[in-house]
Image (cartoon, coloured by chain):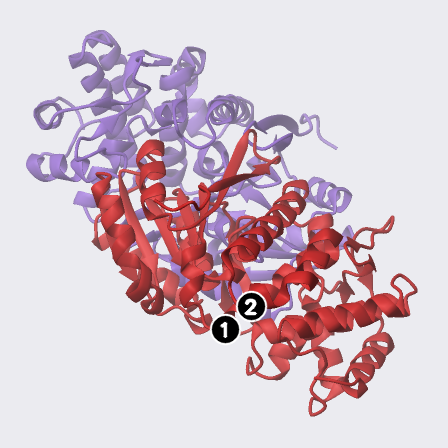
Chain colours: A purple, B red
Amino acid sequence: MTGAPGPTRMDLHHPAETGRVTPLWVGDRLDRFVAEELSRQRLGYRYALITDPRVAARHAAPLEAALRDAGLEVERLVFAGGERGKTRAAKADLEDRLFEAGFGRDAAIVALGGGVVGDVAGFVAATYHRGIPWVALPTTLLAMVDASIGGKTAVDLPAGKNLIGAFHPPAAVYADLAALDSLPDERLREGFAEVLKHALVADAGLATFLDDHASDLLGRRPGPLRHAVEVSIRVKAAIVAEDPREAQRRAVLNFGHTVAHALESATAYGMSHGDAVGIGLVVEADLSATRGLLQASEVATIRRLVGRFGLPTRVPPGLEVDGLVERCEHDKKARRGAPRVALLRRIGAAAGSAAGWTFAVTREELRDAFRRSQESPGG
Amino acid sequence: MTGAPGPTRMDLHHPAETGRVTPLWVGDRLDRFVAEELSRQRLGYRYALITDPRVAARHAAPLEAALRDAGLEVERLVFAGGERGKTRAAKADLEDRLFEAGFGRDAAIVALGGGVVGDVAGFVAATYHRGIPWVALPTTLLAMVDASIGGKTAVDLPAGKNLIGAFHPPAAVYADLAALDSLPDERLREGFAEVLKHALVADAGLATFLDDHASDLLGRRPGPLRHAVEVSIRVKAAIVAEDPREAQRRAVLNFGHTVAHALESATAYGMSHGDAVGIGLVVEADLSATRGLLQASEVATIRRLVGRFGLPTRVPPGLEVDGLVERCEHDKKARRGAPRVALLRRIGAAAGSAAGWTFAVTREELRDAFRRSQESPGG
C-alpha cells in the first residue's frame, strides 16, 4: 500500500440526452479498479480490447489479467494505430474481426491507447449493431485531457481529418497516470499544448499553475501532474456539457487550432500536432490583440508560457504565408469561405459576442498575423 | 385544385433526446410542400438529393424543380440501390462524392426512395462531419409505414443485414402517396406485410379495417390507402417513442421477423422480404398459440388476413426444417444461442411478461411450428 490518493471522479453530463452521465476517473495504476467497475456495471457480455502495437506491448497484459480475474471475458484486437491508421478501412477491418470473433450486440469495447485508438475504437462502437457501449482508457496526456472527453469519434479522409465520425460518448473514461511514465517527451508536450489551451480559454488559475510548475510537470512529478490533468478535464467537461454538439460555446476549444491545422497540412503533417497547436495558440492570441480584445502584454505572457513547455511559438520562416492563409480558408469551420476562429478577451477567458463564440477573420488579418509571427523573436 | 385533403402531420417524439420531435407528414403530391417546408426550416445551406436509378427516373426532376423554385441549392447523387447496394463501399463512395461536390458541415441530405435509399442515405448523414441533418421522402409503402419511422439507419455485411449503422432520426418524413401509383404490385404487398404486423401487435381496429378493405387497398384506392398508411405510421411512431433504442417494447415490431429472416437467408434472398414476413406472421402467431397466449381461431383469422393481401402463409415444403431452426438460433436478437421472438396475446396486442417483450423459444418449438406450417393447407 502506498499513501497515494485513490481515483478521483468527475462527471460529464450529457444534457441533450436525458439523464446520461459519463464518469471521468483520474488515478494511478487503475487496472484492478477498471476491472471492478466493469464487472459491477455489466456493460457487455464480452469485451473487445482495441489497442495499437506500442500500447499493447506496454499496458494490455496487466489490464487483461485484471479483467479476467474479475470474471470478465476479453479478447484483444490490435490495429496499426497512428494518424495513418485512422481510416474507414481500419474501421471496417475491426468490424469484420469483431464479427468473426462472434461479438454480438451484447458486446462492449475497451479502447486502450492514445487519441487515434479512442477515435477509431469509439467510432467502431458507435456503429457496430447501431451502437454498443465503450469505455476509454487513454494512455497519452492528450487523450486524457482532450480527445477522450466529449464523445467525438472519427476517422480521417484524404480530404481532411475527422471528416467521418459520430458523437458517441463512452460509458466511462479511466485516465491512468501510470501510463504517462513511458510516454515520449514529445507526446507529453503535445498534451500540454491542449492543457495550455484549456487554461487560456477558461481558467486563469490553471494558467498561473502551469507557469509556476512547468519544470515539475515536464519532469512528470505525480502531484502537479495529477492536478493539471484533473483541472484540465474539469474545464473541458464543463464546456462540453454546456454545448455537446459544438453549436455554440464548445467552439472555444478550437482556439489555436485553425492555425494549427493549416500548419500541419502545409507541412504534410511533418509538423507534430503539439508543435502546431503551440504556434497556433500564440498566433491566435495575436489575432485577438489586433482586434483590441487582448492586451499586447498578455500575448507576450502566452508566448513565454508556451515556450516554457518546450513548444515552438512562431511560424517557421520557410513556410509560404499565402498558402497558409488559403488553408485556413478551407478549414472545415469556415462558413462560405470565411475562416472563423475563437479569440481571447483575457488569459482565462474566451471572447464571446451576440453572434456566438467564433469570429470571421479576413485574409489580410491572417496574412499579417502569420508575417508578424515569422518575424517575431525566438522559435 | 382538387378536393383532396392537405397533408396530415403526426409527431414522433424522441424522449431520450431533450425536446426532439420528427414530424411525419402524409399527403398527395408533396413536392412543393416539401420545398416550402425545407425553405422555412433552413436545415442546410445546400442539399444533396440521394436516390437510386429507378426512383430518379420517376420522381427526382419535379422535386428538384420545386426545391430550386423555392431558392434552394440541390445536387443529385444517384447510387445503385437495391439490397445489394446497402454496403460500406456504397456509403464511402457517396461520402467521397459529397466531398468532391464541396458539401460541408452546413449541408443536409434529402433521401428519396425506398428502404435501402433511406437506410444508406440516413447512415451517410449520421456520420458525415459527425452528423448532418436529413429528411426522408419514402417512395415505397414499406418505407412509408416502417423503414423511415424510428431513426434506424444501416448497411449490410456479408455476415448479415443491418449490422453496421446508427440511430439518426430524420428531421422530417414526407410520405407522398402519389409515389405509390408506380410501385410494382409485389412491392405494394411487401408494404402491406408490415401494415398487417402493426395491426396484429398493436391495433385491432386497423386489423378489422384491413380485413374489410383488402381489395380497395390492393387496388390503391386513395381514401382507404391513406387511412391505412396514417394509422400504421401512428402505431409505429407510438411504439418507437416509448422505446427508441429497442431496449424493451420496440422489440414487438420484430413480430414475424425471426422466421422471416430465416426464410430469406435459407433461400439466399430468393424469397422476397414481403413474402417472408407474410409467412413469419402466421408461423409466429402459431407459436403464440402453442404457448396458450393466442386462440387457434385467431391464428386462422391471421392466416386468412395475410392471404387476402396476396402474401404466402406457409413455409414452402421444399425447405429443410433443421436448417431454418439453426438460422433462427443465429438471429442477431438471439441471446446466448436461444432465439427470442415477439408473441401475440390477441389480434391487436403483443404479449408482454415481467421479463420483457420477447420470449425464448426452444429448438423443438420452432421445429414443430415449421413442420405444422409446411403441412398446413393453402400456400
Residue plotted at (78% across, 55% down): B350
Quadrant into which the N terminus of chain A falls: top right
Q: Earlier in the sequence, mark 1 or mark 2?
A: 1
Mark 1 crowd level (few <14, some 14–19, many ≥20, 10 Å Cα): some
Q: Using the image, name the chain to which the residue with label 1 belongs.
A: B
Q: Amino acid at mark 1?
A: Asp
State the residue at coordinates (55%, 29%): B19
* Res A326 quadrant in image: top left
- Say left or right for A365 vs B228: left
Q: Is residue B208 above or below residue B242?
A: below
**How many residues crowd around disc 2 within 10 Å: few (fewer than 14), some, or many (20 or more)?**
some
Q: Is residue A80 visible?
A: no
Which chain is home to disc 2?
B
Q: Is residue A83 above or below residue A230?
A: below
In the image, A300: left or right of A170?
A: left
Residue A149 visible to an observer of this rendering:
yes
The residue wearing badge 1 is B185
Residue depicted at 17% across the width and 44% down the height: A266
CB of mark 1 within 8 Å of CB of mark 2?
Answer: yes
Residue B218 marker: 2
